[in-house]
Amino acid sequence: MRLFLYNCFGLFSPSFYYTHTGEEVRRIADETLEKLRSMITFAIDVGRMEKVNENAVGKWV
C-alpha cells in the first residue's frame, strides 16, 4: 500500500504525489526549486547591498 511512502518532509503533500505522474512531479519540483533558489539568491543579494550601505553610511538603511 502506498499510503506511507511519503512523509511530511517531502516537497509537496502526499496527496500531490497521488494526483500527478512521476514526470509531472519531477517537472513541478524542478520549477519550484528554481523559484526558491532565485528567492534565496535575491534575499542574499539584498542583504549584501544593505551591508554595503551600512559600511558606507555607518548604519543600516
Image: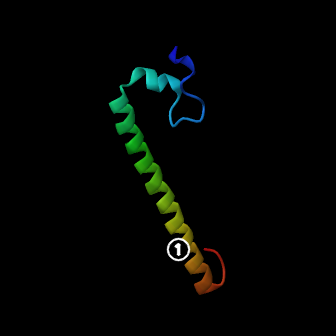
Mark 1 = which residue?
49
Residue 20 versus residue 42 in the image, above or below: above
Image point (54%, 35%), residue name: 10
Name the colour scheme.
Answer: rainbow
Residue 48 versus residue 32 in the image, above or below: below
Q: Position of residue 6 (x, y in %)?
A: 54, 27
Under mark 1, the amino acid is Met
Examine the image and state in which quarter residue 4 appears. Answer: top right
Disc 1 element: helix
User: How would you rate the neighbour count of disc 1 (Cα within 10 Å): few for under 14, some for 14-19, many for 20 or more?
Assistant: few
Q: Position of residue 30 (x, y in %)?
A: 39, 43
Considering every residue shown, the one lying at the far right of the view is: 59
Considering every residue shown, the one lying at the far top of the view is: 1
Image point (57%, 79%), residue name: 53
How many marks overall? 1
Q: Position of residue 38 (x, y in %)?
A: 43, 56
Q: Position of residue 3 (x, y in %)?
A: 55, 17
Examine the image and state in which quarter residue 18 appears. Answer: top left
Give the left or right position of residue 47, taking residue 32 as reference.
right
Give the left or right position of residue 27, taking residue 18 as reference.
left
Image point (35%, 38%), residue name: 27
Residue 21 versus residue 38 in the image, above or below: above
Image point (50%, 68%), residue name: 45
Residue 34 versus residue 17 in the image, above or below: below
Q: Quadrant of the C terminus?
A: bottom right
